[in-house]
Amino acid sequence: MRIEWNGHICGDIIIREIAMQLDRNKPEGTYLCRFGGDEFIVLTPYYIAQAKETAKQLINAVSLHKFSKEINITISAGIAGGRRYLP
């Protein structure tokens, strides 16, 4: 009998590995939190240009990681924010 390695157990391991890669590669002064099942938020104090560069670096770090059972994983990122100025 052959048992396949997949489902929730595999997903949990992959999510942990993604979290570790994001945490190891996030810049100092940023915060990482899990938002939903497979969603993460990285909070930064950066303006949009540096936030985009940070997102690219995190995407690259995850894509280069060798995941368990050699599963290919990619991530995508969106950037939301606003301008904060004192009058």
Image (cartoon, grey):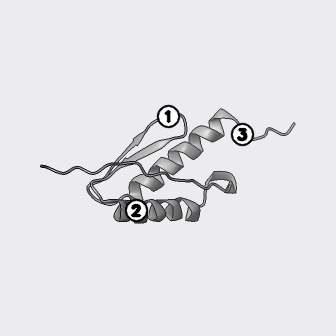
Q: CA distance from mark 3 to mark 1?
A: 20 Å
Residue under the image location 23 percent in, 49 percent down = 84
What's the residue type where badge 3 is placed?
Answer: Asn
Please name the residue that numbered disc 3 is placed on: 6
What's the residue type where badge 1 is placed?
Answer: Gly
Please name the residue that numbered disc 2 is placed on: 54
The x, y position of residue 86, in whole percent, is 13, 49
- Answer few, some or many: residues within 10 Å of disc 3's Cα (few below 14, many 20 plus, some between 14 and 19): few
- What secondary structure is marked by label 1? loop
Q: CA distance from mark 3 to mark 2?
A: 31 Å
Q: Quadrant of residue 54?
A: bottom left
Please name the residue that numbered disc 1 is placed on: 36
The x, y position of residue 66, in whole percent, is 60, 60
Indicate which label's residue lies in the foreground, 3 or 2: 2
What's the residue type where badge 2 is placed?
Answer: Thr
- Find residue 51 and name its label: none
Q: Residue furthest right?
A: 1
The x, y position of residue 62, in whole percent, is 53, 59
The x, y position of residue 85, in whole percent, is 18, 51
- What secondary structure is marked by label 2? helix
- Answer few, some or many: residues within 10 Å of disc 1's Cα (few below 14, many 20 plus, some between 14 and 19): few
- Answer few, some or many: residues within 10 Å of disc 2's Cα (few below 14, many 20 plus, some between 14 and 19): some
CB within 8 Å, label 3 to label 2: no
Left/right placement of residue 84 relative to residue 72 reads left
Q: Residue furthest left?
A: 87
